[in-house]
Image (cartoon, coloured by chain):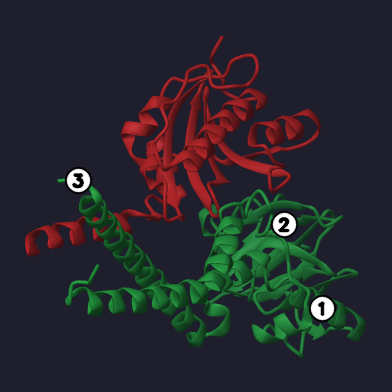
Amino acid sequence: MTRHPKSRPRAKLLRSLYIWHRYFGLSAALFVMLLSATGLALNHTESLRMDSTHIQSEWLLDWYGIHAPDDLSSYAADSVLFTMVKEQVFRNTELLSGFHAPLVGAVALRDFTVVASANHLALLSAEGELIESLDHSTGIPAAIQAIGTTSDGVIAIKTADGYYLTDEDLLAWNETGRVEATWSTPTNTPPELARALQANYRGNGLTLERILLDLHSGRILGKTGVILVDAAAILFLLLAISGAWLWSRRRASAREHKRKLEPR
Amino acid sequence: MIRVYLIVLILFGSGATLANGDYQSPEEFLREVFKGATPETSVIWLKGDIKETASEILGHPYPGLRIRYWGEGSRTAWILEEIGKVKPITVGLVVNGDSLEKIRVLAFRESRGWEVRYPFFTDQFTGIGLDDDKQLNRSIDGISGATLSVRALEKLARLALYLHSQVHLPHDTTP
């Protein structure tokens, strides 16, 4: 039997495509495994608590450039210290959740401690339990600059627009004229507390979910990683196209072969 | 083709702008509810059974030990917050007697589920009350893609109805 003269270059092309298809497949295998594993995990981040699992690896924290600030300052309210570490605020070493920097001051009354940020007041019990969180929606004036207590033991706040005094239950804030008060001022954070807060800040800065998202998108390697994942996506496309092409050629050739074998 | 593209762009664009925001301030809501004469602020302390029941309703402890409300006659108004998926939804609620008179989303901060602010959804809560198990005594039709926001509003409606039953109104005229 002699081959058709046209079938020789076609066979060569097919063989070359087979080889390329194999290379595409091998190159894509690593990416397929990586993307499948991270994609599967990302689909279940909440149930696997990946959004609340924090990475403690020093080199990964360094890689992400997560560094705690060197100089910290605190506001004292009785024997308790409130410290701002970047955007977070701590009551001694405990994070005040839902309370955001910049910290403006803290004052202690008989049963309450009031912590102030620029647009937010947190009313805490003597044990540090949150009683109420107050912001503009509860009548708190914006742009708080300082918090203090008057000689009568009334809490006063100083804002860009003026001075405000509160009632006994801290329910209403009434604008008033200039107030003489003992304003809360920052003090140096004791070194031991500063070290504990810096370690805490760094340890809470990176979640497992973030790492998986960045592995999935390639962003963990910066722009290079994104280009690599883009290349992988193109590779998957080429793999699908070359696979489909090879399958169709093979099917056509099998049909032709069968037809030739059939008795006329 | 260009026309289709523009329509899609406008639809998606408007969706994004409507997605979140402050729709009404709590002060405005209270002024509207009490026709300009907002009563003095009162508080209910979350202690003992009240604290426990509030936690059961929300599925987590309430972030605070006291909640503000405004009461007049048999009506109380509440400004409550609950997290939908990640961020809190601020909701204004009015309870009259044993049933909910009004529920309104005042601020929505998430990127999905903002449809819960529309009357086609919130109107379902009008007249709703609590059964003996402190569940809503009528079912609420959900919204596809807004499950968590719907759930948050249902919880807040139950919480407001329960808290209302725990406060002693000075001028309550209901028998």
Check disc 2 and report the residue beneath it: A123
**Label 1 vs 3, first from the N-terminus:** 1
Check disc 1 and report the residue beneath it: A199
Is disc 1 placed on a helix, strand or loop?
Answer: helix
Check disc 3 and report the residue beneath it: A263
**Label 1 vs 2, first from the N-terminus:** 2
Mark 1 surroundings within 10 Å by alpha-carbon count, few (fewer than 14), some (14 through 19), many (20 or more) = some
Name which residue type carries label 1. Answer: Ala
Quadrant (top left/top right/bottom left/bottom right) for the N terminus of chain A = bottom left
**Front label number (3 vs 2):** 3
B122 in relation to A183, above or below: above
Between B172 and A26, the one lying in front of the other is A26
Gap between marks 3 and 2, in whole Å?
95 Å
The chain carrying label 2 is A
Gap between marks 1 and 3, in whole Å?
83 Å
B105 in relation to A86, above or below: above
Between A80 and B113, the one lying in front of the other is B113
Between B22 and A194, the one lying in front of the other is A194
The chain carrying label 1 is A
Have a look at marks 3 and 2 and say if they share a chain: yes
The colour with which the image depicts chain A is green
